[in-house]
Amino acid sequence: MDGLRSAEQKTGAAKIGPLDVAGIAEECAWHATLPGLSTADAKYRSPMSSRPRRKWHPAGAGYAQGECHGHADGKKGLIIGIANEHSLAYGCARHFRAAGAELAITYLNTKSEPYVRPLAAALQSDIFMPCDVTVPGQLEAVYERVTKDWGRLDFVQHSIAYARKEDLQGRITDCSVEGFTLAMQVSVQSFLRMAKLSER
Ligand SMILES: NC(=O)c1ccc[n+]([C@@H]2O[C@H](COP(=O)([O-])OP(=O)(O)OC[C@H]3O[C@@H](n4cnc5c(N)ncnc54)[C@H](O)[C@@H]3O)[C@@H](O)[C@H]2O)c1
């Protein structure tokens, strides 16, 4: 990773390129399910998980049993949506990291920071920043840091959602305009912002 980083610094900051999430996400989804694989052979276990592992087939034609470490070596990913160790984003991040990816991790606010910090440390993330997508400039600041430190971004994970308590208690048709707008802003529109920022 250091070699890659210094090579990028020598050649100047590269533009952030097209996202390359499909293969890694497929790997991650596969780790979440692991259909029918024997758990007997420790050789196929991730060091970060008690689950067995199989090799991701580069052609996408399926998986072959074997070692899959390193197929994301040097990939740089931004993960937004870790609140605690039960967050879906954390499970995915562990597998991205085990596959060799370098990760930028965000946390929502000062209240959530103490819960997320040790998880970011376990993921060996150098970039650890606040990001509340309703606070103007915070998402942009994360991308600025990524561009400054990495010069590129290979994949992102958007795993956030929010709705006010009062808007979760009635029927969808009872939802206030403000509550609906806020839920859409956090859960949906922020994904479009990330997609746009990732194009730069
Ligand atoms: N858990 C499930 O069964 C399930 C099923 C389908 C879809 N999902 C979706 O998966 C995603 C992750 O959910 P989870 O189950 O891991 O829950 P989670 O509570 O661990 O994750 C939700 C994340 O959203 C973040 N968030 C909320 N408001 C935010 C804001 N304004 N700015 C930035 N981040 C904000 C929280 O900090 C948290 O990290 C959500 O989009 C959820 O709708 C979850």
Image: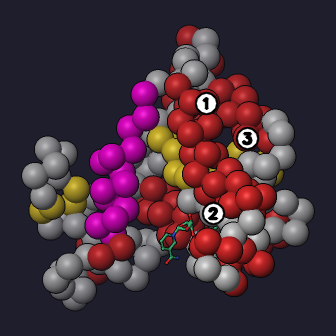
Reading the image, the residue beneath label 3 is 139
Disc 3 to disc 2, C-alpha distance: 15 Å
Disc 1 to disc 3, C-alpha distance: 9 Å
Reading the image, the residue beneath label 1 is 197
Give the quarter the ligand 1 occupies.
bottom right
> Of callouts 3 and 2, which one flags the residue occurring earlier in the amino acid sequence?
3
Task: Name the amino acid, label 2.
Answer: Ala
Task: Name the amino acid, label 1.
Answer: Leu
> Of callouts 1 and 3, which one flags the residue occurring earlier in the amino acid sequence?
3
Vertical placement of residue 6 versus 155, above or below: above
Give the tally of numbered discs.
3
Vertical placement of residue 11 versus 133, above or below: above
Foreground pick, 24 / 118: 24
Counting from the top left corner in percent of width and height, residue 73 is at: 41, 43
Question: Tag 2, which secondary structure?
Answer: loop
> The magenta stretch spans which residues?
18-31
Residue extending farthest to the front is: 173
How many other residues sit within 10 Å of disc 3, few (<14), some (14-19) or many (≥20)?
many
The stretch drawn in magenta includes residue 84? no
Reading the image, the residue beneath label 2 is 161
Task: Name the amino acid, label 3.
Answer: Leu
Q: Are marks 1 and 3 in contact (CB under 8 Å)?
A: yes
Q: Residue at x 68, y 34 (%)?
A: 143
Question: Tag 3, which secondary structure?
Answer: helix
- Which numbered tag is attached to residue 183? none
Disc 1 to disc 2, C-alpha distance: 19 Å
Residue 49 shows in the view: yes
Vertical placement of residue 127 versus 8, above or below: below
Q: Residue at x 19, y 45 (%)?
A: 58
Q: Is mark 2 within 8 Å of ligand 1?
A: yes
